[in-house]
Image: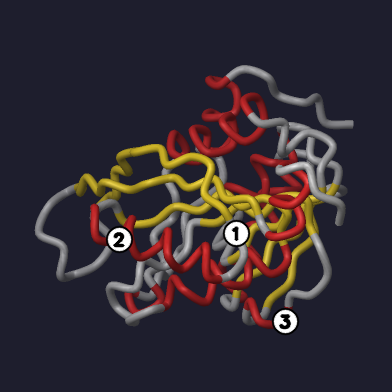
Amino acid sequence: MQRRLVRRIDLEMALSEVRPHPRPDPKLEQYTIPPETAVDLLFFAAYTNDDIIGRRVLDLGCGTGRLAIGAALLGAEEVLGVDVDAVAVRVGLEDAAKLGVDDVVSWVVGDIGVVIGGFDTVVQNPPFGVQRSKADRRFLQKALEVGRVVYSLHKAGASNRRFIRRFVELHGGKITHIIPLRMWIPWMFTFHSKRRYMVEVDLYRIVGGRRREREEGKRW
């Protein structure tokens, strides 16, 4: 049985073993989340808010599964990773086995629209909608639909914050935290001119409709 990791350095080292996508498609914005950013999200969810350990976790648009595998390493009861790219999912499946959590993490190759049911926690690093306008909205809407609490990374900026706040409220959610982070993205595509790029992002913690009612003292 895999020992649950409790130190940041141990989780970051483990997630560095999860390989990035071998053939990323810029149209799908397949930027693998850096290990340190994944750890920031997962530790905040697990140890500040108790939303990972013993929970049913969904990683929407999981890519090669750093968030999904990280949640399992931190002690999630069950984890499901969903991505439309079979190559990415295959990498995640193999690396989950290598890290000893293949009994905890399950994988689905398919569009996020196939996801039904309910999860305690949704984690996601969705497309920012740079290449495909509004691509991030589908992920956020689906996360709010199936998750009691959502951790989602989005492009930083005042205008984007205003839009996401309105969007979340329109779909019955409530933002409890917005945490500014920086992601370092290595050179990946021919149109990149630098060895790595710094991208400013915001990590949102959002409670969905059912969780929001419970946290506000209502019955559900």
| Image x and y of residue 220, in percent | 86, 56
In this view of the protein, which residue sits in the foreground, 203 or 211? 211
Determine the image quadrant of residue 24: bottom left
- Which residue matches tag 2? 160
Q: Is residue 15 left or right of residue 33?
A: right
- In primary-sequence order, the first of circles 1 and 3 is 3
| Secondary structure under the numbered disc 2 in the rendered image | helix
Q: Residues within 10 Å of mark 1 (few under 14, many from 20)?
A: many
Which residue in the rendered view is the most extreme toward the left? 193
| Secondary structure under the numbered disc 1 in the rendered image | loop
In this view of the protein, which residue sits in the foreground, 186 or 180? 180
- Residue at image coords 55%, 63%: 63
Query: Which of the labelled discs sits on residue 173, or is there none?
Result: 1
- In primary-sequence order, the first of circles 1 and 2 is 2
| Image x and y of residue 153, in percent | 44, 52
Amino acid under label 1? Answer: Gly
- Residue at image coords 76%, 57%: 210
Determine the image quadrant of residue 84: bottom right
- In primary-sequence order, the first of circles 2 and 3 is 3
How far, Cα to Cα, is label 2 from label 3?
27 Å
In this view of the protein, which residue sits in the foreground, 96 or 164? 164
Q: Quadrant of the N terminus?
A: top right
- Which residue matches tag 3? 114
Q: Residues within 10 Å of mark 2 (few under 14, many from 20)?
A: few
Amino acid under label 3? Answer: Val
- Residue at image coords 41%, 62%: 164
